[in-house]
Amino acid sequence: MHFQKILKLLFLGMLAVESIQAQGPPITADKPIMLGSESVIIKTLTEIRNTDEGTFTRVPLMLHYLPTSNSLVAVHIPMTSYSFNDGNENNGTYLGDINILGKYQFYRKDGKAKTFRMVLKTLQILPNGKDFGPTEISAGTYQGYYGVVAGYESIKYGLSTEFGYNMSPSGNQDELRYKFGVGLPLLKPTYPVKQINLYFEYTSNWRLETDAYEMLFAQGIQYAKGRLTLEAAIQVPLVQNNIDQFRLNSNILLGTRYIF
């Protein structure tokens, strides 16, 4: 009996960990939950941004590697597509700004089928892309983002928040960013993982030099089975102030993630 209880507790612990990891990451935000050391993740998250000036698409190939269980390094190599409504000569497909991502988990507190964690994050944006169109697609200037990500997850729900500052030394893209998201699993926890998650995500961006501000809302759905995750979301503006060009009408996001 004692041995059977130990096996049951081990199984429930494994189930809880797998269920928590199945909730994410959020689609338009980030989360501090990390996988085991030496894990490799291949991701993509296509953005199709519709504005009054045209439709602009970003398709990144994301390669993530975890040297340890509390650190992550990654490179994002995007292809970008521009389709201006007026037949602009810049219409076409180009290499976008390459991103170098680094994360370090500095706090972790686990409970029974729940966890709270915090991560330091930096995103270095290299100016490989073009400088026309929305800067979210490609800015063509160096930028450095520095932030803190915090998240709480249980088998019932997940909460994520991120606060950071984006520095643009040679442009006017200095920006204060805040994100908040809620994830709700729709299926009972199972092992191996099979889960459907709903996401409700808010993004707040304040561009300091131009006093431009926007708040966006994204509704997303995510399907996780084993090592594969598929996701989709639509993002729309709630508030837009002092944004004179490339105001977002809608943003469709389509993503895939596979863990090796």
Image (tube, rainbow, N blue to C red):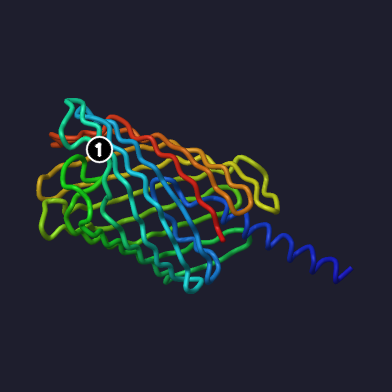
Q: Where's residue 132, x and y in %?
A: 16, 42
Taking the view exactly as shown, the residue that stands out farthest to the right is 1
Image position, residue 257 (x, y; %)? 50, 51
Position of residue 73 measured from the top left corner of the image (x, y, whole percent)? 40, 67
Residue at (43%, 59%) from the top-left corner? 63
Comparing 64 with 153, the one in front is 64
Q: In this view, does 40 lie to the left or right of 248?
A: right
Assign a secondary structure to mark 1: strand
The three-letter amino acid code for the residue at tag 1 is Gly
Quadrant of the image containing the C terminus? bottom right
Residue at the image position 42 percent from the left and 71 percent from the top: 106
In front: 74, or 120?
Answer: 74
Query: Is 113 rendered above or below residue 108?
Result: above
Check the image and report above or below for 122 versus 186.
Answer: below
Name of the residue lying farthest toward the bottom: 68
Q: Quadrant of the N terminus?
A: bottom right
Apparent side of residue 151 relative to residue 101 in the rendered image (left or right): right
256 sits left or right of 185 in the view: left
The quarter of the picture where residue 127 lies is: bottom left
- Side (left or right) of 130 relative to 182: left
Residue at 79%, 62% (x, y): give it.
8
> What's the residue at 40%, 52% (across, down)?
61
Find residue 236 and report its image quarter: top left
Q: How many marks?
A: 1
Q: Residues within 10 Å of mark 1 (few under 14, many from 20)?
A: few
Taking 24 as reference, is 221 above or below it? above
Residue highlighted by disc 1:
92
